[in-house]
Image (cartoon, rainbow, N blue to C red):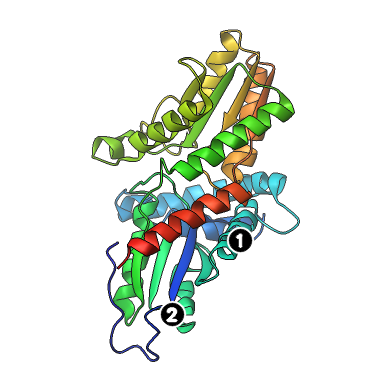
Amino acid sequence: MPARSADDGADTPAPASMQGLLVVNLGTPQAPTAAAVRRYLAEFLSDRRVVQLPRLLWWPLLHGLILPLRSPKVAKKYAEVWMDAGSPLAVHTQRLTLAIGERLPAVRVAHAMRYGGPEIATEVRALQAQGCARVLVLPLYPQYSTTTTASVADALARVEKEGAAPALRMVDQYATDPGVIAALADSVRAHWQAHGRGERLLLSFHGIPQRLVDNGDPYSAQCHATAAALAQALGLGHGEWLVTFQSRFGREQWLQPATDATLRALAGAGIKRVDVMCPGFPADCLETLEEIALQNAEIFRAAGGGGLSYIPCLNDAPAHADALAALVQRELDAWR
């Protein structure tokens, strides 16, 4: 999003030197209960960026069928990975934001969620109230997609439309940021040193409908760019690593190859151990801790594989916070 000056009608003009950072993640239910999950899914699946069906068709399906049936099932999955401090995604996002803030003492730093809370608009206004004339927004989506990053841009546009706002600028993507790639590579090496190395490294990214990529969404290309940069940093050769896509929803064609189908195929080919990393997820969440580490590990075993070793997300690891803080500082320095 292009930087824009705050409206002259702001109640308290902020010093020009004051800068803010808003770290944004997708969102999460407030509790591992059917009611909380239903509220969260209702907001998430109501976003036109996420589901592009006509409202007259989608609304009865969503509220009459999907939410009543899906919410209790998803709540049970959340319960399997819920932390003492709360939802994994919320906990790790907050900790990462604090770690970034420690590295940027001259910047006011906050975090928000695209769905649920803390809300983007509320946190932008809070930073403005603290004297931030400019707010850089960092969505924790390394690869740009119209389904995720563009939705954050939509929320920022609404903040601007509502009235006097700080100047806003968004980081569109950081798919091949050298610092993040180095942190990912170091994490893989550390995992291999501690747990041994599998026969293949699967780099599993969240899927999106193939239709969106066909219409110009750069997400798939950026996922492959991330994977290629990571494989190069690790010195991996052809056949030692694979890119796959997880978390399908609905019946239309999604990006291929699918993570679960690939694991079945590898097991059928006699591969006994695989390592799986999710480089598109900066923070561990339901899709990594339950879908990959539990559900897909069982799929691999049931198909004849030996073991799936999940490599955790970077979360608030010092190298991750260092890389993102450096990225933010570069963006702020370039914002003149």
Tell me the element at label 2: helix
Q: Which mark is residue 116?
A: none
Which quadrant: the C terminus? Answer: bottom left
Which residue appears at 61% of the width and 63% of the height? Answer: 98
Q: Quadrant of residue 132?
A: bottom left
Question: x, y percentage for residue 9?
Answer: 30, 89
Label 2 Cα neighbours within 10 Å, binned few <14 / some 14-19 / many ≥20:
many
Which residue appears at 24% of the width and 40% of the height? Answer: 216
Question: x, y percentage for residue 65?
Answer: 48, 48
Q: Residue furthest left?
A: 215
Q: Nearer the viewer, residue 211 or 179?
A: 179
Vertical side of 273 occupied by 4: above or below:
below
Which quadrant: the N terminus? Answer: bottom left
What amino acid type is highlighted by mark number 2? Gln
Q: Nearer the viewer, residue 86 or 173?
A: 173
**Residue underneath mark 2:** 128
Q: Is residue 1 visible?
A: yes
**Residue underneath mark 1:** 94
Tell me the element at label 1: helix
Q: Quadrant of residue 191?
A: top right
Q: Nearer the viewer, residue 107 or 292?
A: 107
Q: Is residue 35 visible?
A: no
Which residue appears at 38% of the width and 91% of the height? Answer: 11
Q: Is 283 left or right of 151, judged from the image as shown?
A: right
What amino acid type is highlighted by mark number 1? Gln
How far, Cα to Cα, is label 2 from label 1? 20 Å
Q: Is 330 left or right of 85, judged from the image as shown?
A: left
Question: x, y percentage for residue 241?
Answer: 50, 21
